[in-house]
Image: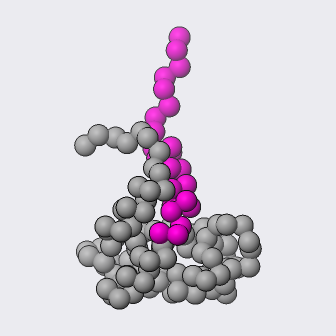
Amino acid sequence: MATRTAPYTKDEIKALLMTSDKAVERAILAIYARQTQEEKNARTTNRHNAVGFSQAHVRFGSWCAGLIQRELRMGKVEGTILRPDTLAKARRFMTKYSRQLAEVANAKLAATQVPPAAEI
């Protein structure tokens, strides 16, 4: 399998979210990880910094993230964790986070790339 070198685009992220249930769950966890600890504890948004869930999605997104994290801690690795109706609702709003998700994916991509050897 070829190693990816090009950065991910928002459109690629949206396409992935529309076709992969697992990508939706991973996206929820990625956006939840960007919430401050205070926001996580209160399940609210108190910083208007365009990072993490918006006020409209924070309660549902945090609830989904908690459920996914709990199931993963219990060892569930096969299939999806969210029920089909919950997954459909999550998919509808997670595409709105494609910019943040592209940032997360591109940061991970940059961290895995080996810098070119210094020329002597």
Residue at image location 43% in from the left, 41% down from the top: 6
Q: Is residue 56 magenta?
A: no
| Relative vertical location of residue 66 with respect to residue 14 in this rendering, above or below | below
Q: Position of residue 29 (x, y in %)?
A: 48, 72
Q: Quadrant of residue 54?
A: bottom right
Q: Position of residue 116 (x, y in %)?
A: 48, 26
Camera-side residue of 73 and 67: 67
Residue 50 sits in quarter = bottom right
Residue 39's image quarter? bottom right
Looking at the rendered image, the quarter that the N terminus falls into is top left
Q: Which residue is depicted at the point 46% across and 34% down?
A: 114
> Looking at the picture, does residue 5 appear above or below residue 68?
above
**Is residue 61 something that shows in the picture?**
yes
Q: How is the image coloured?
A: one colour
Extent of the magenta region: 95-120
Magenta stretch: dominant secondary structure: helix
